[in-house]
Amino acid sequence: MASLEIKRIAKTFGAQSVLPGISLEVPDKEFVVILGPSGCGKSTLLRIVAGLEIASAGSVSFGGAPVDHLSPGQRNVAMVFQNYALYPHLSVAANIGFGLRRATLSRKEKRAAVQEIARLLEIESLLDRRPSELSGGQRQRVAMGRAIIRKPAVFLFDEPLSNLDARLRLQMRAEIRALHRKLPTTTLYVTHDQVEAMTMADRVVVMREGRIEQIGTPDEIYCAPQSIFVAQFIGMPAMNIVSARLDRSNSALTIAGERFAMPEFWPDEKALDGEVTLGLRPEHLSLSRTGAGLRANVDQIEPMGSETLVYLYHHGTRLCARTPPETRLASGSEVKLGLNLNRAVLFDPVTQKALYRPNPYESTTGETQWK
């Protein structure tokens, strides 16, 4: 086991720059998920760490030792792919034990190692089968077993759950995390699925167009995004984004003519004055039929069982409120929106970077105050 250090890694394909220069440190035993849309460079970065791609510039180190000069087989990494990459003519036992073919172990020791991994992954009864006789989830366990048996310094996962149905993905997410607790190995996991990232990671690395947009815990990424891109990429539904104006002289926030009292703990900075972009998660909007609030018209209602998502239009901006399951509203009806500004994020409307972010670990409550 070892820490992983990526220093100013760049990758170009002809005239196209895929990675302009990424740096990332993953401490020993940490589970880090790289998250981003298709084409952002996350899989290319993973393949460079594995040695399957050669970086145009920069370096990769395991435990402080550079590995750029080493071939993939010499790097002591194990990679689990999206398509499993199992040998169809070999049994499950032979697939798992394939990584030990060059190990200086007796046949008995290799058989015992395969049995141990099969017990760990609960696939002992499948050892004599061929991959074609397995379900998708069973094939993925075999692929993970082949990686685990090598006892690598670093685990690499390249969208390993993409080919599974929703129920199996849920099960395999839990199993991969449980496996990491049993075998705490430095892990780099690539996905475009934010649910995988939020439920599995110690830290999440959000990438966009070859660059790192934000690094943080799942709570930090969700509650305190550093940019509008992260705010709207993370969360289902995404964070609501509206234009607003701050008037520090009157401690007021104005949205489409409606004035709110600014929370007292918002910092007194020159940047927080004038035009801003306000971000609020759907759970920080409340609905009422009467009283004070932003006027909005109901567009669509989505009952989800444990909650109801209400989509609305406010001055041409589409918003979403997360409401109790018993919410009953008619499409086209007018409602009033209350805002919990204690959880709001303020962005610069030009750079789209955060000017103010709430502390995700600090509980703040309070009803909307009106001026």
Image (cartoon, rainbow, N blue to C red):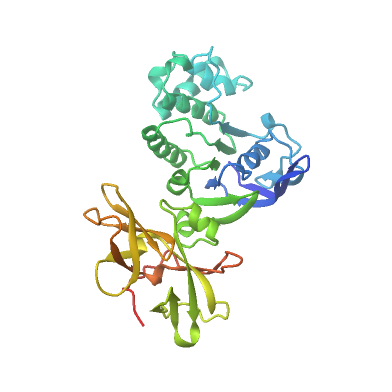
Quarter of the figure with residue 101: top right
User: Which residue is at the front of the view, 250 or 234?
Assistant: 250
Picture coordinates of residue 215, whole percent (x, y): 56, 55
**Residue farthest to the bottom?**
249
Q: Is residue 80 left or right of residue 343?
A: right
Q: Position of residue 77 (x, y in %)?
A: 61, 35
Residue shown at the point (45%, 57%) measured from the top left: 222
User: In this picture, is 302 found above or below 312?
Assistant: above
Q: How many marks?
A: 0
Above or below 245: residue 17: above
The front one of 28 and 131 is 131
From the viewer's perspective, tell me whether residue 221 is left or right of residue 340: right
Whole-percent x and y of residue 314?
39, 64
In the rendered image, is residue 88 in sight?
yes
Report the quarter where the N terminus lies: top right
**Which image quadrant: the C terminus?**
bottom left
Judge by depth and name the residue closer to the eye, 152 or 15. 15
Q: Nearer the viewer, residue 108 or 57?
A: 57
Q: Residue 368, located in which quarter of the rendered image?
A: bottom left
Residue 26 in sight here: no
